[in-house]
Image (cartoon, grey):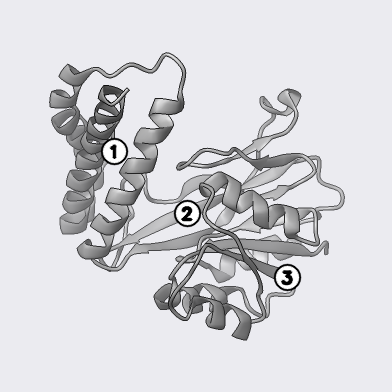
Amino acid sequence: MKKISIVIIAKNEELKLQRTLHSIKGRDWVDEIVLVDSGSQDQTIEIAKANGCRVIHQPFLGYGEQKNIGVDAANNDWILNIDADEVISDELSSEIQTLDLTATQAYGYHILISLVFLGRRMRYGRQFRKPHLRLFNRQLAKFRTTQVHEKVMPLSESDLQREVPTLRGEVYHYSYDNLHEYFEKFNHYTTLAARDLKAKKNQKSKRLLIYFRFPLTFLKIYLIHGSVLDGYQGFIWSMNSAFYNVIKYAKFDELKNLE
């Protein structure tokens, strides 16, 4: 079994990090845990070191660049990136254990991630078993350097069309413990997303479309994607997600008007 380096980025994650590290610690395939901290003022660093993490201090550069700092610092070419609020299931761990990463032709593997929102594991919308390329060979792939919605991309254009295998085990994403925390992250992420929009060439503000984004996005997530079947949590998730889309473009419009 080829050993894997786990890379985590964090800031002030003391309430969630212990749960995350508990799901990793002692796994036979884990060679090291690299945690890139961007200025925690709570017990995040102490918790990380107590659980055997190698801590790197790095002011925040954006999610993609921050993760690449950890990827470059790792001792192994095979990297598993998880967030400080995610938990690896036993099923996923066992599956990774069986992978022959020495012989594989794949540059990476999709990991299925399910959101746990307001105490409920979302099962019917697009936040259930959503594939993300999180296990990859750093010689063949890296994170793209966007402010938000970073993802792993192959380094060679010829690999862009290659099929990426998907593992069956899950990661559980405990992103928001309550609505107060949700809206703290909401404000941060919508600002970063608006900046990403502004950085794109030829991206224009279309203020009239902002009026229609909320109802259309809500109906798509709640009814078409099936979040209605997730009960109260599904309704709140759909409403907030639609509002996110509105505010992202409203902030983008605001940035364009400052030019």
Q: Which residue is mark 3?
A: 32
* Side of 230 relative to 105 (left or right): left
Q: Tags 2 and 3 in contact by the CB under 8 Å rule?
A: no
**Horizontal and vertical percent position of residue 233:** 21, 57
Look at the picture and state if 228 lies above or below 211: below
Whichever of labels 2 and 3 marks the residue nearer the N terminus, that label is 3
Q: CA distance from mark 2 to mark 1?
A: 16 Å
Secondary structure under badge 1?
loop
Q: Is residue 52 left or right of residue 223?
A: right
Name the N-terminal-most of marks 2 and 1: 2
Quadrant of residue 12 in the image? bottom left
Q: Residue 34 appears at what percent x and percent y?
A: 67, 66
Task: Answer with left or right where residue 50 lies relative to residue 213.
Answer: right
Above or below, 28 relative to 218: below
Q: Secondary structure at mark 3?
A: strand
Q: Residue at x 28, y 36 (%)?
A: 248
Tag of residue 113? 2
How far is disc 2 from disc 3 in space, using C-alphas? 22 Å
* Closer to the eye: label 2 or 1: 2
Q: Which residue is mark 1?
A: 225
Report how many numbered discs are placed on residues in the image.
Answer: 3
- The spot of residue 101 in percent (x, y) is 80, 53
Disc 2 packing (10 Å; few <14; some 14–19; many ≥20): many
